[in-house]
Image (cartoon, coloured by chain):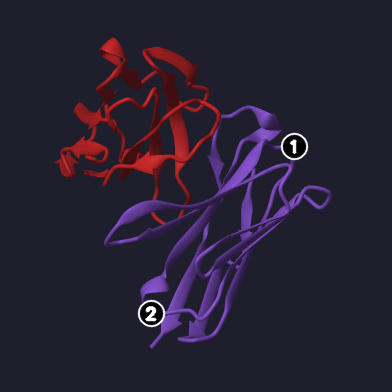
Amino acid sequence: SQQGEEDPQALSIQEGENATMNCSYKTSINNLQWYRQNSGRGLVHLILIRSNEREKHSGRLRVTLDTSKKSSSLLITASRAADTASYFCATDPGGSYIPTFGRGTSLIVHP
Amino acid sequence: EAGVAQSPRYKIIEKRQSVAFWCNPISGHATLYWYQQILGQGPKLLIQFQNNGVVDDSQLPKDRFSAERLKGVDSTLKIQPAKLEDSAVYLCASSLGQQQETQYFGPGTRLLVL
């Protein structure tokens, strides 16, 4: 079974809007990572947040982590058509350092 | 800095045939991962190497899949014999260390088994 599950499965927004996707997991973790995948560039690392951190920013990306709820969110502000991609969270179940990916959220940004 | 290299990019074979994929990680990266990604799903870890030792291969179907990382650098993943359900993209990734640091992915090999 998947350790991390992204929600929603699909998201469709207009350019300029914000996009929020969530990741829930089941066991303790050392850190959580978000990746993006599109047909042009393959899987690309976006951001890593450690279990003792609550929020991280990178450009238009904001990631939060709530270890008490075992959940994380990825916010993309002022979205662009180029943000159209699938977004995956990856965790290490039980703090194993063995990565497990979720099924992903498919984001479509309409120009 | 060169990225993770994989070859071939595409492969079409018939069921029961054999196939091998090659990966060259980023120079200096100790950890190498092979993933299987079926259409519409997230990547599933098949095997993780730390240098030339296996860290985890619990999801590798060992009756037909094998992988090696000689000298702790390049790696090959082999399927013998292939089944229809092995049709997927096989991704190789590497990271500096084992502690789930940032993984850098190659472009993948798209396998179609007929």
Seen in the image, is A60 located left or right of residue B108? right
B72 vs B112, nearest the viewer: B72
Which chain letter matches label 1?
A: A
- Residue at 50 percent across and 28 percent down: it is B59
Residue A9 location in percent, x, y?
Answer: 57, 66
Residue B17 location in percent, x, y?
Answer: 19, 28
- For the question of whether residue B8 can be seen, the reply is yes
B10 vs B102, nearest the viewer: B102
For mark 2, does the 10 Å Cα neighbourhood hold few (<14), some (14 to 19), or many (20 or more) residues? some
In the figure, what tint was chain B given? red
User: What amino acid is labelled 2 in the image?
Assistant: Ala
Q: Which of the two discs, 2 and 1, labels the residue nearer the N terminus?
A: 1
Note the chain letter of the purple one.
Answer: A
- For the question of whether residue B80 can be seen, the reply is no
Residue A1 location in percent, x, y?
Answer: 62, 41
Please name the residue that numbered disc 1 is placed on. A28
Give the quarter of the figure containing the N terminus of chain B. Answer: top left
Please name the residue that numbered disc 2 is placed on. A81
Vertical placement of residue B38 versus B22, above or below: below
Seen in the image, is B66 located left or right of residue A26? left
Residue A19 location in percent, x, y?
Answer: 57, 75
Vertical placement of residue B27 versus A42, above or below: above
Give the image quarter of residue B111: top left
Give the image quarter of residue B12: top left
Which chain letter matches label 2?
A: A
